[in-house]
Image (cartoon, helix red, strand yellow):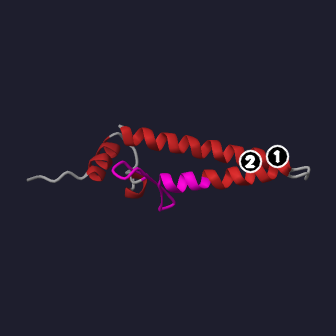
């Protein structure tokens, strides 16, 4: 019985097309079986994302209540982080459904 090695197949195709081989690290960015994304070799699952969203929402609320001149700018940073995490959470959910 022949075993299938996904990384070897992808690397063979890449080399045949004149590209550099892909490392196994690059192939393991998303684990569809568990719905986990890997960033810098750290697993980030939906629970991590939801926790981070709550954390940034809390910080955004505090920043908006602050009278400091840079508070609106900081709140904007938190909003960007929340939006990015919500997008990531949505993409993770879409991958699980596929």
The image position of residue 1, as x and y in percent, is 8, 53
The image position of residue 44, as x and y in percent, is 49, 56
Q: Residues within 10 Å of mark 2 (few under 14, many from 20)?
A: some
Q: Secondary structure under badge 2?
A: helix
Residue closer to the observer: 14 or 85 = 85
Numbered circle sitting on residue 11:
none
The image position of residue 32, as x and y in percent, is 36, 48
Q: Is residue 60 left or right of residue 21?
A: right
Q: Is residue 13 left or right of residue 85?
A: left
Taking the spot 87% from the left edge, 50% from the top edge, the residue there is: 70
Q: Is residue 87 magenta?
A: no
Do the CB atoms of the residues marked 2 and 1 lie less than 8 Å apart?
yes
Residue closer to the observer: 16 or 98 = 98
Taking the spot 37% from the left edge, 57% from the top edge, the residue there is: 24
Q: Is residue 1 above or below residue 87?
A: below
Q: Residues within 10 Å of mark 1 (few under 14, many from 20)?
A: few
Rounded to the nearest angstrom, the CA distance separating label 2 from label 1 is: 6 Å
Taking the spot 50% from the left edge, 55% from the top edge, the residue there is: 47
Q: Which residues lie in the magenta part?
A: 29-52
Residue closer to the observer: 62 or 26 = 62
Which quarter shows the C terminus?
top left
The image position of residue 87, as x and y in percent, is 56, 40
Q: Is residue 69 left or right of residue 57?
A: right
What residue is shown with label 2?
77
Taking the spot 69% from the left edge, 49% from the top edge, the residue there is: 57
What residue is shown with label 1?
73
């Amino acid at each position: 019985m022949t075993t299938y090695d996904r990384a070897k197949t992808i690397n063979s195709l890449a080399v045949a097309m004149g590209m550099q081989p892909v490392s196994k690290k690059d192939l393991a960015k998303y684990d569809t079986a568990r719905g986990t994304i890997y960033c810098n070799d750290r697993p980030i699952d939906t629970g991590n994302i939801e926790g981070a969203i709550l954390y940034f929402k809390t910080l955004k609320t505090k920043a908006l209540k602050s009278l400091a001149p840079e508070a609106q700018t900081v709140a904007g940073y938190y909003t960007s982080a929340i939006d990015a995490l919500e997008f990531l959470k949505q993409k993770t959910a879409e991958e699980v459904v596929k």
